[in-house]
Each structure stands twice: as C-alpha cells, then as structure tokens.
Amino acid sequence: MSTTVRPGTETAWHGEDVTIREVLDALEAIRARFACSEAGDDEHVHPRNCVMTLISVTPSEADELSAEQTTLLIGREHPAQAIVIREEAPVRGHKLDARIGTEVQRPQMGCPTECEIITIHVGGQAADHLAELLDPLLVSGVPTYLWWLGTPPFGKKELLDALRICDGLVVDSARFEEPHRSFHGLSRLLKVAHHRLGLADMQWSRLRPWRETIAQFFTPADRRKFLSGIAEVGVDYAGEGRGNRIAAALVTGWMAAALGWKLKRAAAGPGGVVVAHYEAGARSVEVAFRSVQKDHLAPGELSAIRIAGASQGTTFRLTVQHDPERRAAQAEPAYRTLHPTEGEDDAGFELAERRAEWHRDVLHENIESLHHTATGDPPGESRPKRPVVLSRDRRRPDSQRVLLTMIEIGEGAPLRHVQQLDREDEVALLLDLLSTGTHDEVFNRSLAEASALVDRF
Amino acid sequence: MKVQEAPNPLAEGLHDYRVADPAVMVIFGATGDLSGRKLLPALYNLAKQRSLPAGFAVVGAAMNELTDQAFRQLAGQKIHQYSRTQPIDDRVLAAFLDQLFYVKVDFSKLDDFRALAQRVRELDNTNHIPGNRIFYCATPPPTYQTIAVQLQAAGLNTGEGFHRVVVEKPFGYDLKSARDLTQTLQKVFAEDSVFRIDHYLGKETVQNILAFRFANSIFEPVWNTNLIDSVQITVAEDIGIENRGAYYDHAGAMRDIIQNHGLQLVTLTAMEPPLAFEANAVRDEKVKVLRAIRPLLGEDIEQSTVRGQYVRGWVLGEQVPGYREEKNVAPDSQTETFAALRLFIDNWRWAGVPFYIRAGKRLPKRVTEIRIQFKRPPHLTFGRDAMKEVDPNAITLRIQPEEGISLKFGAKVPSAGLRIRSVTMDFQYQTSFLVEAPEAYERLLLDCMIGDPTLFTRADEVEAAWQLIDPIEESWRNSRPPLETYPAGTWGPPSAAKLLQADGREWHRP
C-alpha cells in the first residue's frame, strides 16, 4: 500500500498484512498522543469531537483518492472518522493493508480536532464481510454513513450485510454502470434493507435546485390552483437512451408522487421523444422526455423542464433551463492526475502528458461510441465497468452555473428569473445529503415512482 | 376569518424550503448604515440560496437624489464589502441588482410617498406581484411614526395582498413612547403585520435555547428551583460606542441591551414549554415570564441594580478613551455603559432563583452567554477534601462567540486516592453540523416575507419589558444607585461583583 502521494493528511501509521485489532491499537495510540500533546499543563485533555463515521467503498485507486480528498474536506469542517475501503485481488494468507492519515484542525473558536482517515485495502472473503470488518472501528453514539462510489452490488447479500451497521447509504445513480438496471436495484433496496436505513442519492441532491424552482412557482396562493391544471410537462436531458433518462425519471417521479398522478403508459413518440401518460384525477398529464445534444452537460443531466397548463381560464407556462446561454468552463480533467510523471524531469512529464492525452482522446472524448461498439449495448444503457477515468468528469464543478426561469401567466409579459446552481462537487453533495440524515421520505416516494416509470421505458 | 392555505405539496421535503410569495420590499433609509451592512447583503444571500421568489423586487427609499442605476451601484459596493458569503457571485448579484429600484422620499412629503406608490404599482404589473408589500424602516426610531402615517395617507397600506411593516429596536424610549408607537403602527397595520426586529432572536444559538430545553427530555426536569441555584446572563462587548454616541448617550446599556436582548434571553431561559413552536404560543409564554418578574421598586433598585460608565483603560492590548471622551457624548454624561441587575421570577418554577443580568461596553471581551448554575449535592459523599476542586454543576449556553453548550460536572482524578475535579462536556455548534448557519438578518427577513412572526417581538412583550425598566430608569435619574466608573477592559464597577457577593455567589468569568 502506498503511503505517500496522499493529499492533505500526514501518515500517522501504516501496516501491511495486519488485522483490525492492530489498526485499533494504532488508532488508540494516535488519539492518546494527540490528546496529550494538545492539553496544556494545567488542563485536562480536550474531549474528542466526532459527529459521524463516514465509510467510503471505492472501486478503484482514483476513487480511493477522491474519497480521501472528499472526506478530508468534510472533516475539516465537521470532525468525523473516515474509513476508506478498497477491494484488492486476494493473496493467500494475506490479511489487510491499512493506513491512518491524520490532519489537525485548529479552529479560531474551540478546541483543536484531529481528522482521521483510515484507508483499508482488503482482499478475498473478508471484503464480502464489511460489517464484521468495520464494526469494531465505528464510533459509538454517532451515525454511520456508507458512501458507495460506483455501483453497489444490488441484490447481493454482501451489500445487505454491509448495510447492517449503517444508518444511511449514499450512492450516485449518475455513476451507475448499468443505470437502468442499477436504478431498479436502488429502488428495491427500500423494501429489503433494514427499516432504519436512510437512502440518499447524489443525483437527487443535484435535482434540488430544479425541485425548488418548480415548487417556488406554485407557492404563491394565487398560483396554487395551477397545480391541478398542469397538462403538459417536457423534460429535456443530455445523452441518448433510457440509461440517460434516470434524472428525468426522478424529477417526474417526484412530481407524480407529490401531486398524486397515476402512471398509465409510456410510449415512444415522434422524433425520438418518449411520452409518459399520467392520470391526475379526471385529467390526464402528458410528460415528454426529449434527448438533446448539449456538449456542456454530462450524459443524463437535465437540460430543461417545461410545465404548462391552465386553471380557471388562466394559462401558465413555467420554463426552467439549465445554463442556457453559456458553456460551462471545463474543469481540469481528472485523468491528468491519474498519471504519475515517473520522474521529475522533462521526459517524465512528457510521458505522463502523452498518456493523459491518450486517455482524453480515446477514453473520454469518444467514450460513448467506443463503449457502444465494445459492448453492443444501446446508447445510455451501460457505462464502463470501472469508470476510473470518467468518474470525475461526469460532473463538472462549475460554480458559475445557473438556472434560468421564464414565467408566463395569462396575457402578462414573461418574467425572467436567474438563480445560481450550488456547487456540485462531491463534498457539497455529500454535505447536503448528510445534513438531512439521509432519511428523506420524499426521495423514497419519488424513487418508487421513478422506478415504475423507468420500467415502462 | 383567515382561511388556512393548503400546503404546497411540491415543497414537502425541501429542507430549509421557506419561499415567500413575490413581493415588493421598500427599504426606508436604503442608503444608510443598516441597509448597507445588513439588509442588502442579507437579501443578496437569500437570492444566492434561491430563497427569493421570481418577481421579488426591492425599492430603496431615502432622502438622497439617486437613480436606479446609482442605487444599484451603491448596493453592489455594500454587498461586496459586507456579504457573509465571499467571493460574490457576479451572476447572482447582477440578477439581484436588476430587481433593485430607487425612489427619493422625503418622509415629510406626501407627494414623495405617492410617487413611491406609483412605482410599486408598476412593479406589481411587470413582476406578477399580487400587491404584496413589506415596508422596512431602516431609519432612526423617531421616524417610524411619520413613515407609518405617510404610508397610510398614500394608500400604501391597503389593497390586495399583504402589507407588512418592519421596525428595529429600540421600540420606544419608555413605556409611554412604546405605547404611542404601537398605537400609531396599529392604526395603519394589523398587529400581525407589524414585525419588530430584535436581531438577537434571529441567531441560531438563541433559537437553540428552545430546542435544547424542549426537544430533550433530560434537561427540563431539572430546570427549576429544586435544582437550579441561580442563572447568570452576560452580554459583554469589547467595543465602545463607535459612531453611535448621539443615540447611545440618550439610551444607555439598560435601554440598548437589557430592555430587549437581555430580557429576551431571560424569557427564553425561563419560559414554560409552549404548545407548539408557533408565533403566538411562543410569545404568550414569553409574556408570562415578563409579567412574573418581580418589579424592582424603591429601595430594591438600589440593592439589586448596578450602573457604571467606563473610563480610559486597556482593551485587547490597546489603550482606549473613556466614555465621556467619545464623540457626541456629553462631557458630564450620566449615561451608563454597564448595567447589572438581580431579578426574581415569581412563579412556581423559579421561586427563589435569582437571575443576574449584566451588559456593558468596553468589557474585556465580546461574549454572550447564559449560565445555569446548579445547587451543590446535598451530601458530600466523598468528603470535603476530595471535593475542594469541584465547582457546582453548570450548563453554559454560549450564544456568541464559540457558539455551543457545555456541561460542567465532577469526575474522579486518576490516582490511587479519591479526588474529584471539575471537567467539561462540550458541544460546539461550529463543528457539529454539516450546514452553515445563516446570518440573523437572513433568517428574519425571510420570516417576515413568509409572514412568520415567531421570532419577532409582540406589542405586549415590548410593553411588559418597559414596565420593568421604567421604574429603574427613573430611580437612576435620581442617582439611586449612583453611577460608578470602571476602567475599560474590566468586568464593570466594583458593585457588580458585590451584587453577587452579597448572595454568597460570584460572576462566572466567561
């Protein structure tokens, strides 16, 4: 296990072929050392402040690095114990490799805290028994969240076992390898996981500005009647195929669950548009899903939502568009950081640069067509099994993105309203989800409705 | 009868989802200090959080001759300078400034208010606003009544939609002026449309007092005279009066802090559980506490109150002038910059428990906290020697800074013998939640837009507070007790310490 090249933290301990007992002993020694070093001569040691245990299960080294970085940033604001797990190929007789990284925070107000990140590489059968492996490491009395980067093994016993020790599971359905199938797995988890488990999806968190904007439109008392006058909904999304329709289904599922719409049927319409028909009391509501070409959006991301209808003789139309006027700035692609320079000289840098370019050209720019050719899956149906290169690129942390809302009511002039989108990096999304404790009934209902809709696609 | 709106089903589950109806907010005194430092930055941050509805517009109203564009420029500068969130997002700011307008208003001229009305009606049409208006008086208190009367004369307080007025503390100078103000405001606006801001109530930590007491089952059973020895409330500032000399020299620490912030903290600490966290239920309970406070009259005032004025001294390593040397302060000023009192709440829960309150300027540090001091154990099981390092149990609610709560209790010192020492169990707001707390004005402005007056002060609360303060002020005017001095950078005059020493207690050093 590498003990260098870890952003931010200092390696306080590492061990190869060790047991959890040894990790625990090391942790105890690190904590005691910190507590004693921070206490003054005339005061007792400060209490250890910890608000949660955050376990990240990572499918690749790139994800491991990403999880360490994310949990470190969270730990800087909110003292937590972070555990990062990665499964490795089993070696007979080898137990596990572990590393404990620490970073001390000295807030202006309050006591210093030490953020701990315990990184564990585990292989063989032990990896299938995460609960038993991790239980001794959990901090008593604070919630435990499991953040599964990539696609969790839905339907498998090992996932349910791992969830036994957790209060919440956080996934990102935008990163599922087979979005359509995995989304069903996520939905089924609601029925089979233990009743205390909260379920959270970063995709749902990304939809929050859309949901807020739509809800805002219907909030004034004189517009509430429009809720029962909705006749048409249009959802535009980037990318092709049903696998890229997950976010669109989720936002539709949210509206259907909230407004009591019943799904009747979904059918392909002209121009590649898929139309779902809902029954809303005596009325019907038509929801059209349209794939659009938007280079600045990641596949599956929402591009626009239009809601139109009439009530008591007044027509209304709400249009919410994602960053309609400008292309989002390109963030530094993650693949660059994945290539070590193999030496701090020009040759080493050039080699790394060439590898990075190959990654970009071959794996990134042409990913859709390459993957489609390689697997034979229809567009959007599946994603590379190990999205090492693409995982970070699918979401672009551009803090300048906006939602543009256009409101038209009756004969009045359209009203234009611009709102900023929140940061969409994993730190911000995780904080958003964890701050609500991952128990979100509205998400659960929306997920169930969306799953039913995805079924019809 | 007001018909209860059905909730918006699409709003369910959107945590912090508190979106107001579109409205026009008119800020009187829009070019002033409060508007620039607090209101405009708070509105910008609400826009940034997507909490302002489409169509929401702000009309600045002040004496200066400004165009819309000049006002936007001024607002942009203030937001850059004072916003809680940095860096400023240019697109959010541009969109926010687009909805800022300006009308020159001389408060004495009805025609100016008519022009304002015209501008507001235009915005109703262009922004799909159903007549909703909020009038924010970010102006000196003596102008509140004039503004209210002019609003009525210009017909700005009637018509479709809601019409709310926001006024800042102090609400009056004494009981009579507070009643006059209430009467004037109530002639123009319904009481539930009058929002009296005491920004302390917008602080998360102040609201957390109620959560701490009423969302937990372990504290409330001990929260009474059976186990509590005394309560200390400290509202200390290290700064002087800055550029508020003209105001402060007429107000003093009692009117500036104790009459509002101080008594609000007393009510939140002492109130009975309300039936619900709902405006009138909460405020009813607060008023009951104010009415149960034993009035200080006659000799009580000399024995239970202390007033002091700072003289030249050292604060935070810097030498600072005395109060009478400050700008716009009379050289022979008798205004107190420090006040301390001992109060008793005559009800079943608090019988015999003294509440000590102190507030002052140029004290050693800026700190606001409530300390609940518990009684000593009835029997010293471990003997007097083992317990000599142990203070009585105490819960400290830290309002600012280092927001949090700590519990002090005794624990055995690791050793062969048996010695007990005080240790602290600590909760820190800053590091225990995964979300950033909004600024008090953001919370209160949004509450006002939504029409939730829970965190605003009701007329009867204001009057009950003045009923307690008026006799003290009158006695102080007659130098009973006399005004003492204290060097800047100390915890008040000697009598402040004596106030507690007389009861066998001492102030906790925050």
Image (spheres, coloured by chain):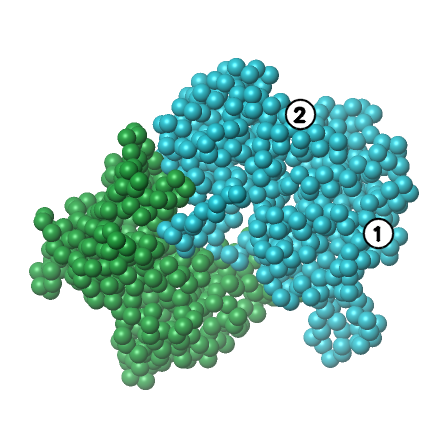
Chain colours: A green, B cyan
Q: In this picture, is B226 found above or below A369?
A: below
Q: Which mark is residue B500?
A: 1
The C terminus of chain A sits in image quarter: bottom left
Give the residue displayed 41% in from the left and 33% down from the top.
B130
Q: Which kind of residue does numbered mark 1 sit on?
A: Leu
Label 2, residues with CA under 10 Å away: few <14, some 14-19, many ≥20: few
Whether residue A56 appears in this view of the structure is no
Regarding mark 1 in the picture, which secondary structure is present there?
A: helix
Mark 2 and mark 1: Cα distance apart in space: 38 Å
Residue A106 in picture, x, y percent from top left: 55, 54
Residue B196 in picture, x, y percent from top left: 61, 37
Give the residue displayed 84% in from the left and 52% down from the top.
B500
- Front position in the image: A284 or B144: A284
Name the residue tied to disc 2: B142
Q: In this picture, is B162 found above or below A110?
A: above
Residue A286 placement, left or right of A40? left
Residue A134 in picture, x, y percent from top left: 42, 75
Regarding mark 2 in the picture, which secondary structure is present there?
A: helix
As drawn, the residue found furthest toward the front would be: B1
Whether residue B359 appears in this view of the structure is yes
Q: Chain of mark 1?
A: B
Q: Nearer the viewer, mark 2 or mark 1?
A: 2
Q: In this picture, is A205 found above or below B387?
A: above
Tell me where residue A419 sits by quadrant. top left
Tell me where residue B183 sits by quadrant. top right
The N terminus of chain A sits in image quarter: bottom left
Q: Are marks 2 and 1 on the same chain?
A: yes
Q: Who comes first in sequence, dot 2 or dot 1? A: 2
- Front position in the image: A65 or B69: B69
- Front position in the image: B454 or B48: B454
